[in-house]
Image (cartoon, rainbow, N blue to C red):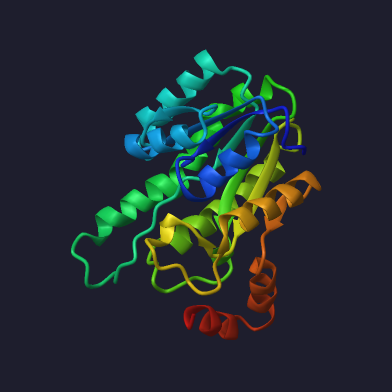
Amino acid sequence: MVLQNNTVLITGGSSGIGLELAQRLIERNNEVLICGRTPEKLQRARQKLPEIKYLQCDISKPADCERLRNWVLEEHPDCNVLINNAAIVHVENFFQDDDILDKADAEIQTNLLAPIRLSKLFAPILSNNKNPAIITITTGLVYVPRTIYPFYNATKSALHSFVQVLRSQSSDSPIDIIEVQFPAVDTPWHQGNPPDIAISAKEAVGNMIQEVEKGNKEVQVGKVKLLYLLSRIAPKLAFRKLNSL
C-alpha cells in the first residue's frame, strides 16, 4: 500500500515510534489522528505537529475504545488506516512483585485485547473508504523472549499470531492486514536506558514505511530478520545472545 492521501489513526501517537510515525505521515496524508492516555503528552505532540488531531483516551478500557471509534466515525469518517501502536511494559520479577497480576492484566488489556477490540470496531469504518488497512506494531521478541519482560513478549507473540489469523480470514475483505516487527528502538519507552543495539525512531519508521509501500504484509525491521533466522537455526543460542545484551 501507499502511505499517502490517507486519513490515519495512530494509537499511542503522542511519543516514541507513534509520534515519529505521525510526523512522517502528516507530510503526505490528508489527516493524522492520534490518541493517548496522557493529556500533557498529547498537548506536546500538538505543539510539535499542529496539524494533528487527537483524543485523550485509555484503550485498555473497552468503553474508551468505543469512544474512540465514535469520535472517528462522527468527526473523521474518511479514516482508512488504523495503526495499532500503543503498548506498555513492566520490567519486574514475576515471583518477587506482589502486584504482578495487576501488571499482567494491564499489559494484556493494552497490548493484546485493545488491538483486537479496535480492529473489530474500526473494520466497518475502514472498509467504507479506499485503500483500507490495519497496521499492527509488534516486535522481534515474538521469536525470542527477553527475560526482563514477564508479559510483554507473551502479549506481542499472541498479537503476532492473531494478525496471521486475521490476514487469512480477511481474504475476502478489502482491508490490508499488515504487521511491523521492530527491533529495539531508542525512544522514551526505554526510560532513558535503551540497549546499545537500539536504532533511532527515525531509522525504524523510515524502514517501516519503505517496506510497507513495497507491499510487504509482515515487515521485519532492521536486525529482526537476523533474530528470526537465528531463532530457527539455533534457538538456544538466540535466547542466550538476546538476553546477554
Outermost residue toward the right? 214
Q: How many marks?
A: 0
Query: Residue 40 at what x, y percent from top left?
Result: 33, 37
Residue 59 visible, this angle:
no
Question: Relative to 169, is 245 above or below?
Answer: below
Residue 34 visible, this angle:
yes
Question: Relative to 236, is 58 above or below?
Answer: above
Query: Residue 119 at what x, y percent from top left?
Result: 55, 35
Q: Is residue 66 left or right of residue 225?
A: left
Q: Residue at x 69, y 21 (%)?
A: 129
Outermost residue toward the top? 74
Which one is in front, 10 or 27?
27
Q: Is residue 71 left or right of residue 40?
A: right
Q: Is residue 92 left or right of residue 36?
A: left
Query: Residue 235 at what x, y percent from top left?
Result: 60, 80
Q: Is residue 237 left or right of residue 105?
A: right
Q: Residue at x 46, y 46 (%)?
A: 15
Query: Residue 184 at what x, y percent from top left?
Result: 54, 65
In which quarter of the view is residue 2 placed? top right
Q: Residue at x 66, y 78 (%)?
A: 230
Which image quarter is the N terminus in? top right
Outermost residue toward the left? 98
Q: Residue at x 65, y 69 (%)?
A: 223
Which one is in front, 4 or 49?
49
Question: Relative to 110, is 103 above or below?
Answer: below
